[in-house]
Image (cartoon, helix red, strand yellow):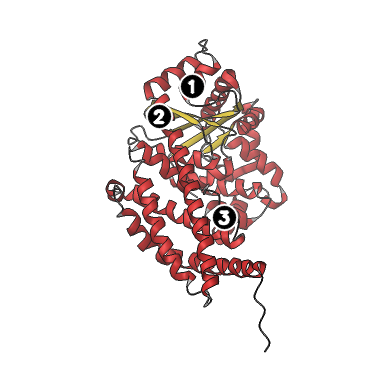
Amino acid sequence: MIRAEEPTAEQVRQEVGALIQAGAKVALSRLDDELARIATVHLDAPGMERVAADPVLAESSVRAIRATLAHWTASVINQPFAPVGPPEDWDNVRIARDLVRRGLDETVLVAYRVVQAFVWQEWIRIAFTLSDDPAVVQGVLEHTSASITDFAERSLQHIGEIMAAEREHLRRGSRPERRETVALLLDGAPVTEERASARLGLRLDRPHTAVVIWVDDTTPPAHALEPVIDLILQVTEARQYVSVLPQTGLAWMWVSGRGPDVRELEGRLRQWPDIHVAIGTTGTGVEGFRSSHRSAVAVQRLLSRSRLRQVASADDARLAALLSRHRDDATAYAREVLGDLADAGPEILGTVRLFVQELGNVKGVAERLFTHRNTVVRRLARADELLPRPLRSNPVEVAVALEIWQWSTDPGGSDAG
């Protein structure tokens, strides 16, 4: 009688790994369908009453849970036996900071454990559909139990670190103290770098960038700028920052590292058309703190004249200053090159500007404007009717003329287009 050979340990391991990957694919494919049930479990957890009662917090919290579950499943699909690090997505960062600001930071820890237990039960059900071999299913459950437990601990530690940093930011940076420290630094007071860093919660010995945010509305609602502050933190992935509100509708901000990418921010800022952002140079130390802010304010002054842009950086301002050094001559040149296009509305002018930036890629322009390709084509056709010479035969001069025109203090024309 011939006896079948027992599988080797490596063969069992390979089979277990393949089944973990298969199960994770099933879990990932079901995630959005199961999200309503997961959200109910999450928001019904003890201590989550105030989160559940706030639609914005509730939605943000559920997005973070979804991102966390998707991160684990995607990771084990890629490498079934590798440790899974904590999620680094913005949804988790934002909800952690928001909960601290609302004094609700401890609630997420309980809710996280509740969701973990619920998801584990769902995973067990999936595991028993993967194989009829009890030993293999046992191997799947043993490994994934250790993986999920380790992942949960890493994730909670990561969230705890974000919350601790936010609590420290709030503790060190009470609004009056922040404003006082910022005012002293900008006025040139002899504040040491170490002391300023401690009071602001921002390492000044490392690169940081100033940002100015303001709203056109003379009576903006309270907290009107907070979503944009959060957006800038998301775009830059800054772990340290400081912000002050010197007056209603105006925020001064410094973020660790380089400032936000103008093109990315420009696209995402369209949902707040009355809000503008000026980005300074990147600096280091106390003097870098001051010079970065000065450059951001200079950009703000230039940007306030423009009909075409919501966002600009110090690099943009340098180019504008160079082009406009002889402003009358530069404006006359721009008017001559643009012809009737100079009086077109911001939609057409902005589309032409992006068309030049994208090197004639209509699809790229449409994606940046979040509009249909045919809309872009129609606007460009209208621009050709208004230009003295067709855009494609004269792109460089049109680009230079638009760069001058968008910073003009008296652009003229109507907004029709």
- For this orientation, the residue located farthest to the top is 190
The numbered dot on residue 376 is none
- Most foreground residue, 282 or 65: 65
The numbered dot on residue 170 is 2
257 in relation to 87, above or below: above
Identify residue type, mark 3. Glu
The numbered dot on residue 367 is 3
In the picture of the structure, the residue carrying the numbered disc 1 is: 198
Locate residue 342, reporting x and y percent.
57, 42
Residues at marks 3 and 2, CA–CA distance in whole angstroms: 38 Å
Q: From the viewer's perspective, tell me whether residue 282 is left or right of residue 147.
A: right
Identify residue type, mark 1. Ala
366 in relation to 90, above or below: below
User: Disc 1 or 3, which lies upstream in sequence?
Assistant: 1
Label 3: how many Cα within 10 Å (few below 14, some 14–19, many 20+): few
Which circle, 3 or 2, is nearer the viewer? Answer: 2
Residues at marks 1 and 2, CA–CA distance in whole angstroms: 12 Å
- Residue 227 position by quadrant: top left
- For this orientation, the residue located farthest to the front is 1
Contact between labelled residues 2 and 3, with CB atoms less than 8 Å apart? no
Which circle, 1 or 3, is nearer the viewer? Answer: 1
- Residue 315 position by quadrant: top right
Assign a secondary structure to mark 3: helix
